[in-house]
Image: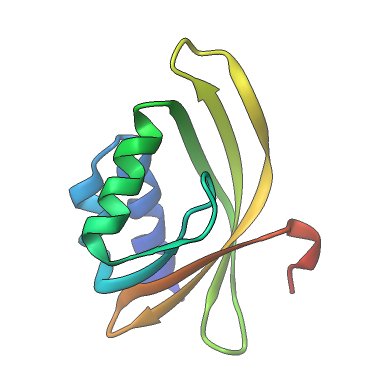
């Protein structure tokens, strides 16, 4: 669990710094990622990169991990404090959500977003 927590903390730091390549290095080449902003899912490094480039050109999201929980199926649930601003700094939304990560060969293979109340 410590390995996954370190890896995920580094990934969140890279995301908040807009280091997309740094984030992608923590993912499998065929990663399955939620498109929480527009709906649906994206798959693979190029689709994830394109999704984030579109997102970052319109909004300024940041996420701070608060708590980590190893689930019985081996996935890791991370409670995050999420803040979304427009490009002028106006607050668009904030709150706690749950990110759930699934790993393959030490890399993130899938991420899901759950409502915090459904945790556990």
Q: Position of residue 18 (x, y in %)?
A: 29, 36
> What colour-coding does the image apply?
rainbow
65 and 41: which is toward the camera: 41
Q: Position of residue 20 (x, y in %)?
A: 24, 46
Q: How many marks?
A: 0
12 and 94: which is toward the camera: 94
Q: Is residue 46 left or right of residue 11?
A: left
* Residue at horizontal 52 percent and vertical 86 percent from the top: 74
* Residue at horizontal 58 percent and vertical 32 percent from the top: 83
* Residue at horizontal 31 percent and vertical 55 percent from the top: 48
* Image quarter (top left, top right, bottom left or bottom right) of the C terminus: bottom right
63 and 38: which is toward the camera: 38
Q: Quadrant of residue 87?
A: top left
Q: Quadrant of residue 25?
A: bottom left
70 and 60: which is toward the camera: 60
Q: Quadrant of residue 96?
A: top right
Q: Position of residue 24 (x, y in %)?
A: 24, 58
Q: Position of residue 101 (x, y in %)?
A: 48, 70
Please tell me whether residue 17 is drawn above or below residue 109 in the rendered image: above
Q: Is residue 94 left or right of residue 50?
A: right
Q: Is residue 32 left or right of residue 92?
A: left
Most distant residue in the bottom direction: 73
Q: Is residue 83 left or right of residue 41?
A: right
Please tell me whether residue 43 is drawn above or below residue 106 in the rendered image: above
Please tell me whether residue 7 is drawn above or below residue 105 in the rendered image: above
Most distant residue in the right direction: 117
Most distant residue in the top direction: 88
* Residue at horizontal 27 percent and vertical 85 percent from the top: 105
């Amino acid at each position: 669990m410590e390995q996954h927590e370190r890896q995920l903390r580094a990934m969140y730091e890279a995301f908040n710094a807009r280091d997309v390549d740094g984030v992608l290095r923590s993912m499998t080449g065929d990663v399955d990622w939620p498109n929480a902003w527009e709906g649906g899912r994206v798959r693979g490094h190029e689709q994830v990169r394109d999704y984030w480039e579109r997102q970052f050109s319109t909004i300024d999201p940041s996420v701070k991990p608060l708590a980590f929980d190893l689930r019985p199926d081996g996935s890791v649930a991370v409670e995050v404090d999420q803040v979304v601003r427009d490009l002028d700094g106006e607050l668009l939304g904030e709150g706690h959500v749950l990110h759930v990560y699934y790993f393959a060969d030490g890399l993130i293979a899938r991420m899901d977003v759950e409502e915090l109340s459904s945790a556990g």
